[in-house]
Structures are given as C-alpha cells and as structure tokens.
Image: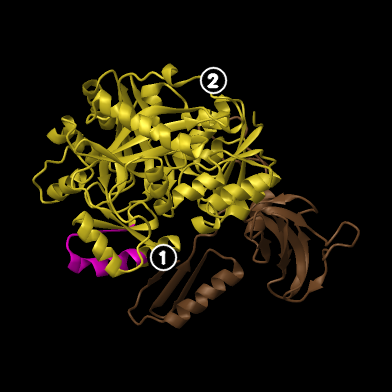
Chain colours: A yellow, B brown
Amino acid sequence: MFQKVLIANRGEIALRILRACRDMGIRSVAVHSTADASAMHVRLADESICIGPAAASESYLNPVAILSAATISNADAIHPGYGFLSENAKFAAMVEEHGITFIGPSPEHIRLMGDKVAAKRFCRHANIPVVPGSDGPITGEAEARAIAAEIGYPVLVKASAGGGGRGMKVVHDPDGLGQAMEFACAEATSAFGNGELYLEKYLARPRHIEVQVLADLHGAVIHLGERDCSMQRRHQKILEEAPSPALGEEERKAVCASAVRVATALAYRSVGTVEFLYADGAFYFIEMNTRLQVEHPVTEMVCEVDLVREMIRVASGAALGYCQDDVRTSGHAIECRINAEDPVTFIPMPGRIGDYHPPGGPGVRVDSALYSSYSVPPYYDSMIAKLIVHGPTREVCMMRLRRALAEYVIDGIATTIPLHLRVLDAPDFRAGAYHVHWLEKFVGEGQSGTVPVATD
Amino acid sequence: MTVTKAKTDFDADLVRELADLLSETGLSEIEYASGDLRVRVARVLQPAAVHGPVVGGAGAASALPATAAGGPVREADALLDHPGLLTSPMVGVVYTGSDPATPPFVKVGDAVEAGTTLLLIEAMKVFNPIKAPRAGVVTRILVSNGVPVEYGEPLLILE
C-alpha cells in the first residue's frame, strides 16, 4: 500500500480523497494555489505545498509544479480527483515516468476515451449502440449536410475534444448547419485547442443514465449500478439519483451489462463511468469518463462502498476481492450539487461565508470544504457543497432531502439551495418523469414567475 | 487598489504616481492632500503565501483546523513586507551554486547587476536560474542549498 498520496486537486474532492487516505492510514500531501492557502484540504492534510498563483493554469493545471511537489514531498502516488488534470493522458504518463503511481486508469485509456469520436468507434466495434451520427470527424459542411439528411434533423454538432457542453450546438434545419459548425469549431478550438467536429442525432427527451464501473489490475470488472443524471442545465448536472426512477429491472440489467462490456473490452482499470442516453426504450453510448465523478457518493450510498478507497486500493495492485454477485444495492439516494450561484440567474456569487451549519440526521451526508468565515475564491468552479441523502425508498429519500435542504445554513453568499427546494416540489420530479432538457424549461418558467419560490 | 477623491477634476497621473510610490515603498496606504484635492491610494498587501518550513504540515487538527502556519513566523512576516524581497516563482529545490564543489553564485554583501544569476531552482530535473530583477546588494539569503521551496517562498533580499 502507498505510504503517502499527493492530492492534485482542491475543494470538496480534495477533502474527500484526504478522508479516504486517513481512513486507510496513508499520509496525505495537499497542493494549493495562493488563493487556497487557508482552504480546508490544506488545513487538514499532513503536509501542504503551495504550487502557484491563483490562476488554475499556473497551479492546479500545471503538471511540472505538481510533479515537483510530489518529488520534494516523496509521495508515492498522485490522486487527480476530477476536473483539472484528471483526464489528461500526458500528465498520467508523466506521473508514471517519474516512478509515481497515477491513481486512475492508464494513459492509453484516458487518451482513447477522451477522443469522443474514437470512443464511439470503439463502442460500435464492441457492439454497443451509439447515437446515430457521423462515423468520424466531419470535414466540411457538404458532408455534414449529407449525414444530417440521412439521420434526420434536429442534429447536434459536437467537438471531438468537447465536454461540459462546450463546443456543442443544436441545429434544427439545413440552413443553420454552417453557422453552428463555425461556432462549435471556434468554441472547441479556444477551450480545448482542437476544433475537430462530429455530428449526432439530437434526441428530444432522453434521460442521462450512467453506470459506475470498477476494475482491478488483474482483469476483474464489476459495475455498481446506474445513476440517473437527467437533471441538467447547460449540460451541467445539478442533481443525481440512484437507482433511476425510469428503469425497470430488465433495462437496468441491460445497461449495466453494456457498461461492463465496454470496460472489459478496454481491459480497463480503476473507476470509470460509462454514460448513455436513454430514449424510447433504447440506450445509446455517449462517452466514458475515465475518472472519479462528482456524483460518486450517490453510488456509495446505495452500494455501501467507499469508491475512493477502492480506487486507491486497486491502484496499489490489490485484487478487487469480491465479484458482481457480492454487490448489493439498498434503498434510494439523491445528490444535490450546491453552487455559489444566484438560484434564479445562475450568476456565480463568490464571497465570504458567515454562519455555516450543515444538516445532519438519518441518511444525510455532506461533502464540502466549507467552514464558517471561509471565503469562496472567484477563480474556480462554483460548486461548494454536495448534499447526499439516502432513504429506504425514493419517497423517504425525498422527504429527508427536503428536511436536509431546509436545515442547511450557508450564510453570506447566494446558493442554489432554493432551486433544489423548488425542483423537489415539482410534480414531474416527484413522479420521476423528467429528461435532460426538463430543468432548462423549468427554470425558464420560474423566471416568468409562474413557479412559486420555496422559502425554507 | 482603491482610490477615493474629493473633487471631480480627476488627475490620473497623480494617482498613477502615488500608486507607483506605493509599490516602490511597500506601503499599504498613502493619503495626499493639496488644497481641496484629497487622494488616498491603498492596496491589500499580498498575504503570506508560505509560513514556516515548506513541507510543514498542520499535524493534528484542532477545533477549527489551523493553517500550516503557527510556528516561528514573526520574522518571515516582517520580511514579507520588505520591498527588496525576491520570492520563488515555482515549487522545487533551491540550489545556491551550480554544484556543491563551486562557491555559491552570491553571498551576503555582494553587489550584483540586473540579470545576474542568484540561485537555481530545480523543478522536474530542469534547473531554472533565478536572476536579479535589478542591480543591488544582496543583504539576506533566506534559503540554504538543497532545500525544497514552495511557490511564493521568500528566497533573498536585494537592496
């Protein structure tokens, strides 16, 4: 087992990884920018090293600074968390070249699945259905028009290197295609340094269903059930739940088996998430995330497993030690992402936290690096807390979620807690009848004043 | 940097001059008044990026976990305000000379030209020279050969 793990991240996920390390008796090294000198992961770590100025490009995204920190602190492994360098194949390779273990998949898997076109091609070959679209990158508008005519409008123009909704445009008719391609290409070039595009059929009301997989270095692959992440705004997940209220046992079995097939075909290792769109009874592979995900606690709550611990354990070479039949799920879990944003306009609202009181009681878990008098810096992601609630049934889970949201005090800044309370009251949500475009319509209604805003 | 003024005939040059003076002297605030005109320029001094030894550690967390600070930081705090302070531009290992056999690049009391190599910082097997940003005299060297440094850690004072 590792003696010392360097955590190449910040915020709640740095703290989450630190906690797993401490539970396993592993020493932790926090790295931080000057803006995070008093962050909770820095306060709690066994050692901490300032690696650069506030700008992420010069600190959390700086491979040399992080490797240098790992070297001077004698860390024998690096956990990348999510975001930042977690899906950077070059970084993963650099870490291994320096004789340090990268706690995650191999650089080859990161590279393959990071290229959305190559990932789809791989899955097609493994007989996993993908969303109809271009077989590979599209070279020009004429080719795009021909493919769009074949699969039918509306279509989605997507960037091969894309993610988080950037480099993605919906096109409803042939006239809009050229301009959408220009926009998507420009956006992807500036965000990812790669303007390559591909085309996909746009599904009107799909659900986002993803399956958690876990594999060791010795070929054992299991799944830990699905998560439903259909509650999204601008392709950003807002709330996740497991199991999906939209699936029956047959569908669940089918999608989980598909995910295991993808991971097995890859000879994958570590944790990963295989994402599908679900529409009209069919699943279509969209992408695989080769990292720990924000919403992993939802799975942890229903499977009673510590995914970060498992990730560290298998990275050290340990065998999984159990098989698919040993995995049991129980009850229902929902996670609310709480962002430092105005709950109506979604404008980021960094600032100083006054009083802070996280909720508790049966079935409640809070993953957050907040504390009273902490200042949320303006340089990074606006997500400041995750509230995860478990209950024996979805009904009980929703009741507990309402209680916990109402208890949660984050004074001094605006947060998305009021939005979650409104969603929780929506009949569509209560019935489990929502899809990936539902929330955008719902908040559109809210702004015109037709949906009442819950107060507490 | 905040600027308050009493009159409407805004004198940008004056403010700029005061602001320059502010950085030059390392002060946090200057108030200037002449007749009806009153100008105050102020800034928040860069907080201490580093306290105490580099690979320090908070150890056991108290009620609210303390920062990695808490040790003998008085002197470091005073030095951080020094206008001649040079801080590390990267995390790495500092070297005072090109190899252990040769004398250090500089010692206390040396007068140096702008561009003179003062120290080396090794990050991932690349040696990065830390050069004098201006001519001056080395009055303090705050690091010793072979020690790890964080980003922003005080290296030496050039006056």
Q: Nearer the viewer, residue B141 or A330?
A: A330
Q: Nearer the viewer, residue A121 or A446?
A: A121
Highlighted range, magenta: A167-185
Q: Nearer the viewer, residue A363 or A150?
A: A150
Q: Is residue A98 left or right of residue A274?
A: right
Q: Nearer the viewer, residue B115 or A433?
A: A433
- Residue A129 numbered mark, or none: none
| Chain letter for the residue marked with disc 1 in the picture | A
Residue at 34 percent across and 36 percent down: it is A210
* Viewport quadrant of the N terminus of chain A: top right
Cβ atoms at labels 1 and 2 below 8 Å apart: no
Relative to A47, does residue A132 appear above or below in the rendering?
below
- Residue A321 numbered mark, or none: 2
Residue B69 included in the magenta stretch of the image: no
Determine the image quadrant of residue A450.
top left
At label 1, counting other C-alpha atoms closer than 10 Å, the crowd grade (few under 14, some 14-19, many 20 or more) is few
Which element carries disc 2, helix, strand or loop? loop
Most common secondary structure along the magenta stretch = helix
Residue A176 included in the magenta stretch of the image: yes
Determine the image quadrant of residue A262.
top left
Q: Cα distance, mark 1 to mark 2?
A: 45 Å
Relative to A442, does residue A166 appear above or below in the rendering?
below
At label 2, counting other C-alpha atoms closer than 10 Å, the crowd grade (few under 14, some 14-19, many 20 or more) is few
Q: Is residue A319 left or right of residue B147?
A: left
Determine the image quadrant of residue A183.
bottom left
Mark 2 or mark 1, which is nearer the start of the sequence?
1
| Chain letter for the residue marked with disc 2 in the picture | A
Amino acid identity at mark 1: Ser
Which element carries disc 1, helix, strand or loop? helix
Amino acid identity at mark 2: Gly
The residue pinned by badge 1 equals A190
Picture coordinates of residue A456, whole percent (x, y): 21, 34
